[in-house]
Amino acid sequence: MTEITIESVRKRAEADARTYGYHLVPDPDLLQGLLEGLKVNEERYGYPSCPCRLASGKFELDRDIICPCDYRDPDVAEFGACYCRLYVSKDVYEGKQELPTVPERRPLEKQSRAYTAVSAPKETEAAKAEEKPAAPREEVKVMLETKPKLWYCKQCGYVVFRDDPPYVCPICKAKKEMFAEIKTRIDFL
Amino acid sequence: MQFSKVQGKQTKHKVVLYALSTCVWCKMTKQFLKDNEVEFDYIDVDLCQEEDKQKIREHIQSKGGPLSYPTTIVDDNVVITGFRKDKLKEVLGI
């Protein structure tokens, strides 16, 4: 496995910013701090989850907060920066707009996953070991379930398999409303 | 729950800081409080046990705060979400 360095984290973020027309926050100390946080999370969890959000440590539950997170595009569009402020708009980068404070857009129900997710499987494993088939609490079970579906962008045809459609189409920038679920039907004649 | 205490001359208010060890804004909040010699207790939530995470969540939500970090709770009453120098100065009188 390649070693994770601040430089590799920086290069990946720079490349992503270039691709999608964003900039990295210009303040060097702030940038360094954000990249360090991402590096620690990548080492800890195996993926660079947002340094400013509590992760569950489970890939499926944290997928929406892996940098660049699902909320970056709508947050940069609305406020001029993403939640942790690693990615900023051209105006913020050039100093025409102050670095904003960005409220949390991630739904509370998804945030809550980080507070129960890890302990839940442990309980289940312990129950199995004692051969007591104790059912996990209903609340926990619901939160652990993800139900990915197929979505397509009605504007450009981009297809994605995930719980919810993206806020913005990564290909043509169409809004979430342009996405529709693909429902498959098999007819037996 | 293991809080870390940072000593300071400003002891007028009871300041509790919920932070993430990976978060640069949380680090800046800690530094700001230290620079202003404010005494405070902090805990890095991402390094906590699961039971403690639950308790922290309940504490923050019982005060009406969102689950964002840093969360500073002053005198178990005022919740300041994010690194807000202006609000910290105002509430702490520094």
Image: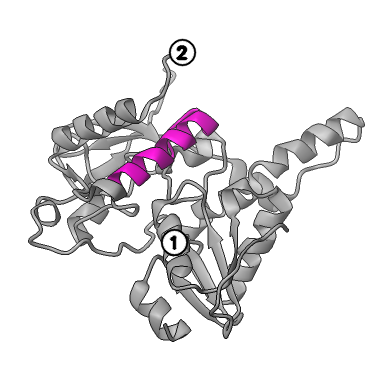
Other residues around mark 1 within 10 Å, as few (<14) / some (14–19) / many (≥20): few
**Residue segment shown in magenta:** A31-49
Return the x and y of residue B77 as percentages of the image width and height: 57, 83
Which is closer to the viewer, label 2 or label 1?
1
Is disc 2 surrounded by few (<14), some (14 to 19) or many (20+) residues within 10 Å? few
Q: Is residue B41 left or right of residue A93?
A: right
Q: Quadrant of residue A148?
A: top left
| Residue A44 lies within the magenta run | yes
Q: Residue furthest front?
A: B9
Residue under label 2? A1
Percent x, y of residue A28: 24, 46
* Residue A27 higher or lower than B55, as above or below: above
Question: Vertical placement of A38 versus A28: above or below?
Answer: above
Disc 2 is placed on an element classified as loop
- The residue that appears at 13% across and 51% down in the rendered structure is A93
The answer for how far apart the CA atoms under marks 2 and 1 are is 35 Å
Q: Name which residue lies at 40% across and 28% down.
A: A185
In the rendered image, residue B61, in percent from the top left (x then y), is placed at: 58, 70
Q: Front-most of A180 and B43?
A: B43
Q: Is residue A173 left or right of residue A13?
A: left
Instruction: Answer whether residue A66 is visible to the viewer in this image.
Output: no
Q: Chain of mark 2?
A: A
The residue under label 1 is B31
Q: Quadrant of residue B52?
A: bottom right
Dominant SS in magenta: helix
